């Protein structure tokens, strides 16, 4: 613990537990500091340690405007979903958990991270329209939405349509519980693929 310069180990554990309970959510430094009885610099230090030791993955926002990008809060995921389950003491099936959707997102991020050298971000507007993941390789971007529900036909959120309208990617993916399909909007080919296929 001295090697990592944790300082207050109890506070560190509290912060890790708070992060596990907020997996897949935005990092609000003020809220974390308040709930963890800590302060901003210590929170940043703890997050740096957790990311550097491959406990958490911090996802930055995607934006065509760098200044906007720098102002937005990052999201937090765990490199190992099993560890986050252990921390919050919840090993129930995904369908029985209130955080089931976020858990599936976490698994998807882990899989995407192993696919190659693509940069992975997320997208969110001030109106709270959001896309889970944006893969970027050079000039090419692929929006990916995790929609872990039983779809019967191709459907997508207004946020997804808004992103396509604004950025006009060649391809987009919606990861489902079991639905396969394909459609096209404004020249963007959208594939619907079961999440387990990735």
Image (tube, helix red, strand yellow):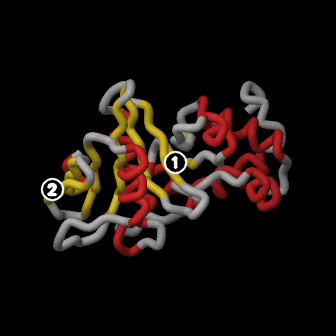
- Identify residue for label 2: 182
Q: Earlier in the sequence, mark 2 or mark 1?
A: 1
Residue 113 position within the rendered picture, expressed as x and y whole percent measured from the top left? 38, 35
In the image, 139 versus 84, the foreground residue is: 139
**Residue sitting nearer the eye, 54 or 39:** 39
Which residue has dot 1 on it? 77
Is label 1 in a helix, a strand or a loop?
strand
Quadrant for the N terminus in the image: top right
Find residue 172 and name its label: none
With 163 as the anchor, is 46 left or right in this view? Answer: right
Q: Mark 1 and mark 2 in contact (Cβ < 8 Å)?
A: no
Could you say which quadrant of the image residue 103 lies in? bottom left
The image position of residue 119, as x and y in percent, is 43, 31
Determine whether, in the image, residue 65 is placed left or right of residue 82: right
CA neighbours of label 2 inside 10 A, class few (<14), some (14 to 19), many (20+): few
Q: Residues within 10 Å of mark 1 (few under 14, many from 20)?
A: many
Q: CA distance from mark 2 to mark 1?
A: 29 Å
Q: Say what secondary structure mark 2 lies in.
A: strand
- Foreground mark, 2 or 1, reads 2
Name the spot of residue 45 as percent of width and height, x first. 75, 36
Residue at 64 percent of width and 42 percent of height: 68
Given residues 38 and 132, the one toward you in this image is 132
What residue is drawn where x is 14% and y is 59%? Answer: 181
Instruction: Say if 122 sits above or below 158 in the image.
Output: above
- Occupied quadrant, residue 25: bottom right
- The residue positioned 81% from the left and 41% from the top of the image is 42
């Amino acid at each position: 613990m001295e090697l990592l310069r944790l300082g207050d180990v109890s506070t560190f554990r509290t912060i890790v537990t708070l992060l596990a309970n907020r997996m897949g959510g935005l990092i609000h430094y003020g809220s974390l500091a308040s709930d963890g009885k800590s302060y901003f610099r210590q929170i940043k230090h703890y997050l740096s340690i957790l990311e550097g030791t491959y406990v958490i993955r911090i996802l930055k926002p995607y934006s065509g405007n760098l200044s906007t990008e720098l102002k937005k809060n990052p999201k937090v995921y765990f490199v190992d979903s099993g560890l986050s389950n252990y921390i919050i003491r919840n090993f129930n099936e995904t369908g029985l958990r209130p955080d089931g959707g976020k858990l599936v997102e976490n698994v998807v991020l882990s899989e995407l991270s192993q696919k190659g050298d693509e940069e992975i971000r997320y997208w969110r507007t001030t109106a709270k329209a959001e896309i889970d993941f944006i893969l970027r390789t050079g000039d090419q971007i692929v929006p990916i939405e995790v929609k872990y529900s039983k779809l019967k036909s191709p459907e997508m959120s207004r946020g997804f349509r808004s992103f396509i309208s604004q950025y006009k990617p060649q391809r987009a993916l919606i990861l489902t519980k079991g639905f396969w399909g394909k459609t096209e909007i404004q020249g963007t080919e959208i594939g619907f693929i079961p999440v387990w296929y990735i």
